[in-house]
Image (spheres, rainbow, N blue to C red):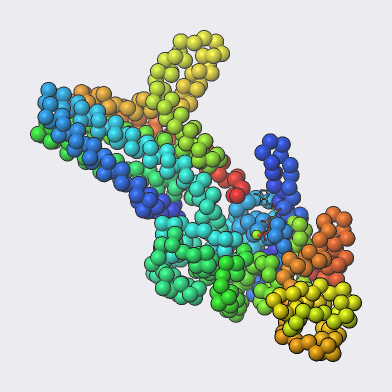
Amino acid sequence: MHAIEILGLEKTYRVGFWRKRPKQALRPLFLTVEEGQIFGFLGPNGAGKTTTLKLLMGLVFPSAGTARILGMELDDRRMKAQIGFLPEQPYFYDHLTARELLRYFGQLSGVEARQLGRRVDRVLERVGLQEAGGVELRKFSKGMLQRVGIAQAILHEPRVVFLDEPMSGLDPMGRFEVRSLIEELKSEGKTVFFSTHILSDAEALCDRVAVLHLGELRGVAAVEELAAGMQAKVEIVWQGNSVPAAVQALGIDCRTAGDTMRAVLPEEHQDFVLEALIREHLRVISLTPVRMSLEDYFVAQLGEPVSTGKGDSAFGQPLRSIPEPASDSEPVGRARL
Amino acid sequence: MNSRVLHIAVNTFREAVRDRVLYNLIAFALLMSAAAVLVGMISINIERLVVVHLGLTAISFFGTVIAIFIGIGLVSKEIEKRTLYTVLSRPVRRWEFIAGKFCGLTGTLVVNTFFMAIGVFLALAYVSHHLNSFDFAVLVAVYFIVLQFLIITALALFFSSFSSPLLSAIFAFALFVIGSFAEDLRGFAGMTHGIARWLATGAAYLVPNLSALNIVNQAGHGQGVGAGLILFNSAYALVYTLAVVSAAVVVFERRNLK
Ligand SMILES: Nc1ncnc2c1ncn2[C@@H]1O[C@H](COP(=O)(O)OP(=O)(O)OP(=O)(O)O)[C@@H](O)[C@H]1O
Ligand SMILES: [Mg+2]
């Protein structure tokens, strides 16, 4: 059985106050996620990630299409008891403490009263809020709210967990903790479906990713394939204010910062530039690989609107042919059915 | 009651209490004690009338304000702040949410009214030195006021399930005012002719008949209240409330959350 099966979900909003114009937030989407996987849902701002999650959660209704979670319809109560959801920038009842909120949500999810207290304590500890259980949520910082949001999503031990940008608002330690938490969920046999626009998060975690752009699915693949398509860059910093002529000839943009120079260049020119610097006796201070965020990637490769079809060749085409590693019986290239 | 409806109701009640809604009781207590002491000093045999009038009007006023101002936020605030997302992604039906919210607020109002009613009876006992059987009418009047709260809460909830808080407040308040004159409205409707009569009569019967639920005058003068009226008013308020809450559910079931 598929954990998630999206069959042509589509959403068109009507925007504008007077004369309503249709705004297609999500084009017909076909996607399946296997049980036990960590699945990344990638795309730049406004791609339609949140829209997809809201459709799956029954918070908005599709213009067309259906979906099944754990083989059940979206309005099936038995299914809802087995899923967890972290909304984007979550916000909770101001008047409750974290512990009260979790108790309330546990009750709504049908957690047995006997187990509730223990579950709440455990989950608070899991998200690093054991100290803050008795604090009113109005006094919570953004990152703490995010942690409560994660806690309420996993409290009732759901089989499928949906997380909308789980790392946003977290400090580096928090990001690391959430990463390990997602990995733990996987090791418990749970399915995790999370949206993000940070490629490194997806790289670190996901078995598979789907890329969405302007409401359209551009491809489904394992992460390595996605990263392989990207041109790696490095940042070199050296002492002094001079730029070797050979480097200048490459047309690389160099900037002064105090008494150092800084240049970002494609990885393939790295050795050439370093040699040029050494030849001129310039002292190299640092050499750092530059992590491209997905936004950079989209700006570089998916800048054009979808309708022209040109954007596809850069990215969508090769991805569609990549076979699914987990099970070869499943069709993969469902992006464009 | 369904356990999810109950949990949502309890949470709504808790929110109202923590938002210091019950603080209005302090204002009410001050008002009643001041009135009782003042009337006791004047003493021209209308003490009872004044205390009953003032007390019941205050109960009605405070409760109506709470019903409208909290009622309009019951749904829209949860949509606006997106607290609803994590509720509706659980095995909670949308109608259960509406029902829970409604029960929570009416529960708050019942508790609030209960304490106010105690205040009125204390004041009554203070000015007339004892309670007599006429005071039963005051109890019925309080009960009818609670029935009014059911209707007003349902209306506020209904409007808030599709419009902004400000508009909801205006609509609910307008219907409260019109409903308070429902009986006069029905009289006017009877005086018109032709198609206007049909329309006017329809409108007059569509607005909540809050004037039938107002027996402050009878209670003030210690007149008895028939069992028939109690029964009829209870049935009327229940049916009207149920219809409006159902309408709210129908609207909310189809709604796309922001
Ligand atoms: N309620 C709405 N009414 C009208 N348009 C909407 C509505 N919600 C979303 N949209 C539009 O749908 C598109 C997709 O939005 P969505 O929130 O799904 O993006 P996203 O991928 O989650 O982006 P982000 O990374 O910024 O969270 C956007 O163009 C947005 O303007
Ligand atoms: Mg989003």
Q: Residue at x 25, y 33 (%)?
A: B55
Q: Is residue A32 left or right of residue B166?
A: right
Q: Residue A82, can we see it?
A: no
From the top left corner, tell me how far across and down residue A295 is, in percent.
73, 66
Which quadrant of the figure contains the C terminus of chain A? Answer: bottom right
Q: Quadrant of residue A233?
A: bottom right
Which quarter holds ligand 2? Answer: bottom right
From the top left corner, tell me how far across and down residue B28 is, in percent.
26, 39
Foreground pick, A319 / B6: A319
Which quadrant of the figure contains the N terminus of chain A? Answer: bottom right
> Is B130 placed above or below A15 here?
above
> Is A337 placed above or below A269 here?
above
Q: Is residue A19 left or right of residue A128?
A: right
> Is B55 placed above or below A189 here?
above
Foreground pick, A34 / A335: A335
Q: Residue B23, can we see it?
A: yes
Q: Residue furthest left?
A: B129
From the top left corner, tell me how far across and down residue A65 is, in percent.
72, 53
From the top left corner, tell me how far across and down residue A14 is, in percent.
70, 44
Q: Is residue A258 left or right of residue A175?
A: right
Q: Residue at x 31, y 46 (%)?
A: B23
Count of numbered tags? 0
Q: Is residue B112 left or right of residue B249?
A: left
Q: Residue at x 82, y 56 (%)?
A: A305
Foreground pick, B69 / A233: A233
Q: Residue at x 69, y 41 (%)?
A: A16
Q: Quadrant of residue A73?
A: bottom right
